C-alpha cells in the first residue's frame, strides 16, 4: 500500500515537471533525478497529504529530488532520531534539499544542539553546512550557547578556503554575528571585507546582497530606523 502511494505521488510529480526548470536546477547544482516541478506545486501536494511520517520516509528513500522536498513537508520531527537525521542529511548532495530539511525539520528539532556539536566536526559537507545553520540560529536566538570570539576566529581562518556550500552558511553566521551583536560588529565587517566571500554574488533589484558587510550594514540600518 505504501509503495503504491509513493508511485502515485511520483507519477503526479512527473506530470507537473518542466524541462526548462529541470535544466535550471541542474545549473544550480541539482542532479538529474528530478522532474523540474515548481515549489508551489510541491506545497499543494503536501497540503493535501498533511502529515504522514511513514510516507515521508518512503519518499525520502526514493532519492528523487521533488519527493525529498515533499518529504520535508510531511515528516513528523518528533518521530525522527538523531541517527536518522544524520543519515538523511548525509545522503543528500544538493544544498537546497538539505536546507529544506533544516528549515522544516531540524531548526526546531528537540535535540538540535547535540546534532550541532556532532555535525560541526563531521567529514560530510552537508552535515557541516547544517552545523553552521544551527550556529546561526544560536547566534540569533541563543547566543549563550556559542563562543562568538572563537567562532569569528574559525570563520576568519577557514571560510575563505571552504567549499562553496559550506561558505554560504558560515557567511550567514558571520552576518548574524555582525547584525545581532554590536560589540563584535566591527570585527565581523573586517573579516567580511578581508575574505570577500560572496562579494560578487549577483543580486536582483531590491534584494540585499549576501556579502556579509553589505548585509550587516543594510539590516542594522533598517532596524535603527
Image: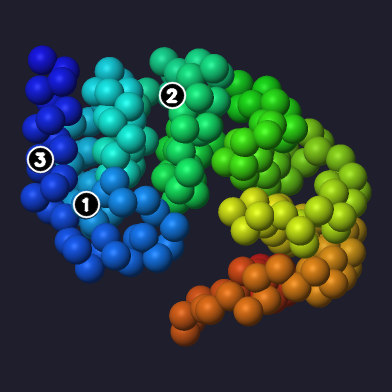
Residue with the mark numbered 2: 77
Q: Using the image, determine if residue 145 lies above or below residue 157.
A: above
Q: Using the image, determine if residue 45 lies above or below residue 178.
A: above
| Badge 3 element | helix
CA separation in Å, label 1 and label 2: 26 Å
Q: Residue at x 39, y 54 (%)?
A: 30
* Whether residue 58 can be seen here: yes
Left/right of residue 52 with respect to residue 143 in the rendered view: left
Left/right of residue 185 with respect to residue 52 in the rendered view: right
In the image, which disc is placed on residue 35? 1
Coordinates of residue 195 in the picture (x, y in percent): 80, 69
Camera-nearest residue between 125 and 57:
125
For the N terminus, give its image quadrant. Answer: top left
| Badge 1 element | loop
Q: Residue at x 27, y 60 (%)?
A: 22
Q: Quadrant of residue 37?
A: bottom left
Amino acid at each position: 500500500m505504501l509503495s503504491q502511494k509513493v508511485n502515485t505521488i511520483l507519477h503526479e510529480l512527473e506530470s507537473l515537471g518542466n524541462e526548462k526548470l529541470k535544466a535550471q536546477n541542474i545549473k544550480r547544482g541539482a542532479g538529474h533525478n528530478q522532474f523540474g516541478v515548481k515549489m508551489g506545486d510541491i506545497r499543494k501536494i503536501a497540503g493535501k497529504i498533511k502529515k504522514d511520517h511513514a510516507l515521508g520516509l518512503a519518499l525520502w528513500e526514493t532519492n528523487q529530488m521533488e519527493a525529498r522536498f515533499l518529504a520535508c513537508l510531511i515528516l513528523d520531527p518528533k518521530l525522527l532520531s538523531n541517527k536518522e537525521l544524520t543519515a538523511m542529511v548525509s545522503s543528500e548532495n544538493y544544498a537546497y534539499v538539505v536546507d529544506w530539511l533544516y528549515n522544516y525539520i531540524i531548526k526546531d528539532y528537540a535535540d538540535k544542539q547535540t546534532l550541532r556539536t556532532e555535525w560541526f566536526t563531521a567529514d560530510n559537507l552537508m552535515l557541516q553546512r547544517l552545523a553552521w545553520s544551527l550556529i546561526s540560529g544560536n547566534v540569533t536566538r541563543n547566543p549563550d550557547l556559542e563562543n562568538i570570539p572563537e567562532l569569528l576566529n574559525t570563520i576568519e581562518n577557514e571560510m575563505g578556503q571552504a567549499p562553496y556550500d559550506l561558505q554560504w552558511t558560515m557567511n550567514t553566521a558571520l552576518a548574524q554575528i555582525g547584525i545581532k551583536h554590536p560589540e563584535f560588529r566591527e570585527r565581523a565587517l573586517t573579516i567580511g571585507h578581508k575574505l570577500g566571500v560572496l562579494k560578487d554574488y549577483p543580486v536582483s533589484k531590491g534584494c540585499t546582497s549576501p556579502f556579509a558587510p553589505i548585509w550587516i550594514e543594510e539590516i542594522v540600518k533598517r532596524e535603527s530606523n
